[in-house]
Amino acid sequence: MNANAARPSTSEPALRLPLAMPPRTGDESMVPDATAIAAATLAALPGATPHRLHRLFVYFDGPEEALAAVRDGRGAEALGDDNRDVLARRWARTADPSAMADALHRRGTRVWSARQSGFPIDPELAQAPAVLFAEGARPDVLDRPRVAIVGTRAATPPGMADAHAIGRYLAEQGVTVVSGLAIGIDAAAHEGALEVGGGVVGVVATGLDIVYPRRHDVLFDRVRRHGLVMGEHAFGVPPTRLRFPVRNRIIAALCDAVVVVEATATGGARGTAVWAAKYGREVLAMPGSRRNPAATGCNELIADGAHPLLDPSDVISVLSRSSPASAYTAVAARAGKATGWNGSTVGLGVAARRLHAGMSGEPATLDQLVSRSGVALGEVAGLIRELERAGRIERARGLLWPC
């Protein structure tokens, strides 16, 4: 999904960036150390799953020692697989730390391995990644409170507007916004945070030299400039359907809370929320109409115990109450009781406000809008233009949507 679509379309081609061309935001002056090179080299080996990497690190007491053993053909000692001898021989032939060191340096890529100081995720969490890669100009975004905003790729205009507003609000409060860089809710949340110069983290299900979806190449570049793009896969790993739901556990593990804006009953966003609950993170969901399939997952999450999100400030309130000694208490004190929604009908005429209220938060055809609001048909066209200029209504999919 995105953080979100468990069944992302792979019909859209991915964009692969040349390894020889470092991203403009990469830290080309950064020289990767031996531990980073070893961890990245091992992560790039065929069949090097997180489980196998963890076993290598534990058995050989660290990435450097593990790489030395693998190159000597002794990798099978750490593995419990039936095909461990075949893997060990293949790994011994393919491990190439020199090529990896060159690629890491050219791109300015940071690498963390589990149990290493500064690893952004608790390695004791179930199915925690063994290695993380990151690229971007703002590694300090990991030093702030972090909240994920996830949802469906097939988002409605109101859902997109809500994700944008939540991302913007949290960024204004100094919270790093984390999402999956997918179309729909993910992109809207990133855009909201970036609009106010906030810190962002985009977690991908590919190698960092792959841009997917391809249409988000500009968004990827902006996230690199104002935060980090992160993932567990080595360079060149392409998008596949199975990698996206697996990626979602990293989004959940990186954050203090997961906010679900719109989600279907079986989508990946709901899966991210399940991981968050498993990891002891707070889960908030935006309630929606029963008529909206994109709200089904959120409504079910609330029924299962997630906090209903009625205003972006609810995120800070929930986290400051659940962790009184955390940074969110200070954030809550700064934020006060101000609402986080950008939209307002203040300044609109009486008829325009009545027309907007007649939508009752749901999309409508022109005829439905006239019937619900009681506004004369002859006035509606002008009032719709007024609401569009104010950003309170949007046309999409043959309907008028409240924003």
Image: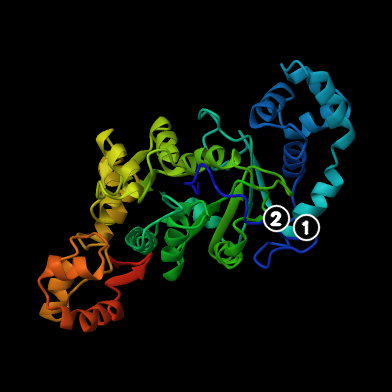
Quarter the C terminus occupies: bottom left
Mark 2 or mark 1, which has the lower sequence index?
Answer: 1
Secondary element at image label 2: loop
Q: Which amino acid does label 2 sit on?
A: Asp
Identity of the residue drawn at 77% across and 56% down:
105
Q: Which circle marks residue 364 in the picture?
A: none
Secondary element at image label 1: loop
What residue would you read off at disc 2? 209
Quick one: label 2, few (<14), some, or many (20+) residues within 10 Å? many
What residue would you read off at disc 1? 19
Identity of the residue drawn at 9% across and 71% down:
374
117 displayed left or right of 153: right
- Looking at the image, residue 57 lies above or below residue 306: above
Residues at marks 2 and 1 touching, judged by CB atoms closer than 8 Å: yes
Identity of the residue drawn at 44% across and 40% down:
272
Q: What residue type is labelled 1?
A: Leu
- Looking at the image, residue 248 lies above or below residue 82: below
Identity of the residue drawn at 81% across and 25% down:
87
Q: Can residue 137 be seen in this view?
A: no
Q: Which of 370 and 127 is in front in this view?
A: 370
108 displayed left or right of 170: right
